[in-house]
Image (cartoon, grey):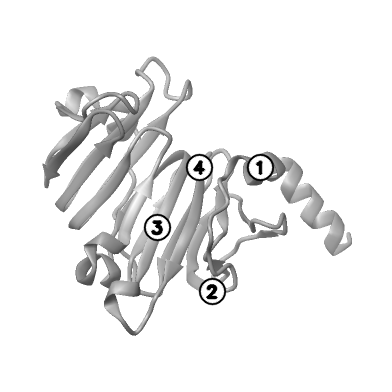
Amino acid sequence: MTTHSLMFNAARVLGIAVIVAAVPVDHVDAAAEAGKVVTVAGRAAAATQTGDIRSLGRGGAVNSGDTVVTSSNSYVRMKFIDGASVILRPNSRFHIENYKMAEKEEENRSFFNLVKGGFRAVTGAIGRRNRSGYRVKTAVATIGIRGTEYSMRTCAGDCGNNPDGDYYQVHEGGIFVGTEGGGQSDYQAGDFAYVQDPSMTPIGIPEADADPLTDDPLPPAACD
């Protein structure tokens, strides 16, 4: 089978043509390597903002500007060059919006968009040294960190009987979650939180109401 055919099949199976169109284009250094894949269980691929698609395997690079995609029953664990780690859930779309390690700490960037699905993450040097340089956006909210390990999942009709919105769990450290219309809330280790839409204030919830995270928990994100 030709390389062109393999790429076409990867795109067809994972629906990446739609994914690329759905991700907003920002000014990024698309050539900059952000990290590498540590493990893949199942199938995963990366799409650039110009539409190039490649399958991901162990040791494969992920770059600033890529959208990393997992198919059903598939997981991918990535380690970024600042030491941060992310493990993606099945059926996830994770856009590395702008990732940059610079000599000046204030120029470091670790900006992501979770388009679909969920992940567990532990922050690295960028999050520790320049907390304003780390954020994750969804269609609902923006997440910042206090130096942490946390999980999150965004639900849009794909979490069974659970309400749509974003769900969060803080494993270590702390996060803050903000929305355009509802303000910002802080959460610490052991907390669970939820936000339904951009007009809502994020709220703390009991573990019993965090089924999208607790029914199928991810292992720790950190890796060697």
Residue at 52% from the left image edge and 65% from the top image edge: 64
- Which amino acid does the dot numbered 2 rest on? Ala
Circle 3 or circle 4, nearest the eye: 3
- Which amino acid does the dot numbered 1 rest on? Ala
SS for callout 2: loop
Between the residue at mark 1 and the residue at mark 4, the CA separation in whole angstroms equals 15 Å
Please give the residue where the numbered disc 1 appears in the rendered image: 21
Q: Earlier in the sequence, mark 1 or mark 3?
A: 1
Question: Horizontal placement of 190 versus 27: left or right?
Answer: left
Question: Horizontal placement of 206 versus 139: left or right?
Answer: left
Q: Earlier in the sequence, mark 4 or mark 2?
A: 2
SS for callout 3: strand
Please give the residue where the numbered disc 4 appears in the rendered image: 92
Between the residue at mark 2 and the residue at mark 3, the CA separation in whole angstroms equals 14 Å
Badge 3: residue crowd in 10 Å (few <14, some 14–19, many ≥20): many
Please give the residue where the numbered disc 2 appears in the rendered image: 32
